[in-house]
Amino acid sequence: MPAQPVIGVLALQGDVREHLVSLAECDVIARPVRRPEELAEVDGIVLPGGESTTMSRLLETFELLEPLRKRLADGLPAYGSCAGMILLAGTVVDGRPDQQQLAAVDMVVRRNAFGRQVDSFESELTVTGVDGGPVHAVFIRAPWVESVGDGVEVLARVPDIPASGAAAGRIVAVRQGSVLATAFHPELTGDERVHRLFVETVRAA
Ligand SMILES: NC(=O)CC[C@H](N)C(=O)O
């Protein structure tokens, strides 16, 4: 691998720009990916936040679904935030019937899990692998992880404080091998530590 790994951001829909900006702070070459030829050139891929059903449909339209599945099956490191987490899951609860899964993480994810009254909220989260104190996590119509398989490491849960209500203890960040997923959006807060954790994974892969 070159000194600066090439990290792609799936650029079909969602907060692509924000991930490119975060990655640019991490000593990597960050590029948008819209075509199979572009996917073939990356050492890691970020699946942004946005709308997972739309992204799933566009993956098919842009003929990226099967190439991406294949690269993930071959071990391409990946990081998904929010909608990206949903796409990476093996199983989605409350997804659309035609929603495609990349099945790169053995987990069941509940879409729009936090409910309408708390569509968006923020929380201080301790994330395993991220040093230097809690991460300020922004959740926007976010999923949570209902359950994980044996090979999946839980990196963060919603803290058990009164304000978190029914969400307390829910899993919101995971890692399986070189695939990382968060229900929140570190690309929106100017804190690159989660992206750096992913970049370390890409460098180690
Ligand atoms: N902020 C987000 O990425 C929201 C995800 C969105 N609710 C979905 O189902 O895809």
Image (tube, rainbow, N blue to C red):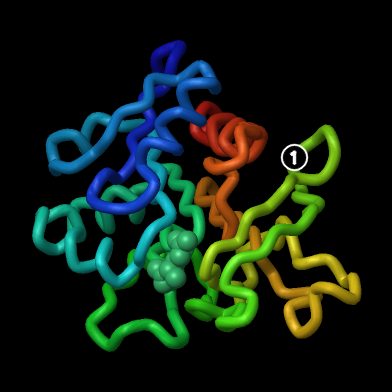
Name the quadrant containing residue 92: bottom left
Q: Position of residue 74 (x, y in %)?
A: 34, 49
160 in relation to 20, above or below: below
Assign a secondary structure to mark 1: loop
Q: Position of residue 79 (x, y in %)?
A: 48, 48
> Residue drawn 57% across and 73% down?
119
76 in relation to 85, above or below: above
Q: How many marks?
A: 1
- Residue type at mark 1: give it: Val
Location of the N terminus by quadrant is: top left
Q: Position of residue 55 (x, y in %)?
A: 27, 61
Cβ(mark 1) to ligand 1 < 8 Å?
A: no
Q: What residue does disc 1 label? A: 130
> Residue drawn 68% across and 52% down?
137
Q: Could you tell me if residue 10 is visible in this image?
A: yes
> Residue drawn 81% across and 51% down?
126
Q: Quadrant of ligand 1?
A: bottom left
Name the quadrant containing residue 87: bottom left
Q: Could you tell me if residue 104 is visible in this image?
A: no
Please state which of residues 120 and 34 is positioned toward the viewer in this rendering. 120
